[in-house]
Amino acid sequence: MLVGANMNHINNWLPVNEVFQSRLAVWKSRFLSIGGRVTLIKSILESLPLYYFSIYKAPKKVIVDLENIM
């Protein structure tokens, strides 16, 4: 996250989106079952943005985009 950036702009939330995409890229292996992937998504991806959301108020589009990734 950028220090001192205006977090009302969607472009400033791109690093969070990139973290989501990088985590999912690792988990798309064929060795994980569907249940294993769902468990990882629920446990990790739902907790990642909590830190950012506790500091900044995210625009609605950012929240919708992160939910769509999940």
Image (cartoon, grey):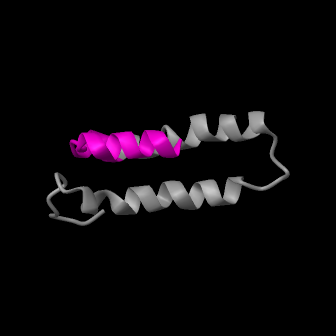
Q: Quadrant of the N terminus?
A: bottom left
Point out residue 5 in the picture as x, y percentages from the top left corner: 17, 63
Q: Residue at point 50% right, 54% down? A: 20
Identify the residue at image location x=25%, y=66%: 2
Q: Residue at x 40, y 56 (%)?
A: 16
Q: Height in image: 58 above or below 18?
A: above
Q: Quadrant of residue 37?
A: top right
| Residue 41 x %, y % | 60, 40
Q: Position of 35 compared to 1: left or right?
A: right
The front one of 39 and 9 is 9
Residue 67, relative to residue 29: is it above or below? above
Q: Position of residue 3 (x, y in %)?
A: 21, 65
The image quadrant that residue 64 belongs to is top left
Seen in the image, is 70 located left or right of residue 5?
A: right
* Left or right of 46 in this view: 36: right
Tell me: residue 39, above or below residue 66: above
Q: Which residues are magenta?
A: 52-70
Instruction: Report if residue 31 lies within the magenta region.
Output: no
Q: Residue at x 25, y 56 (%)?
A: 10
Main SS type for the magenta part? helix
Q: Where is residue 11 drawn, in percent x and y?
A: 26, 62
Using the rendered view, name the quadrant where residue 44 is placed.
Answer: top right
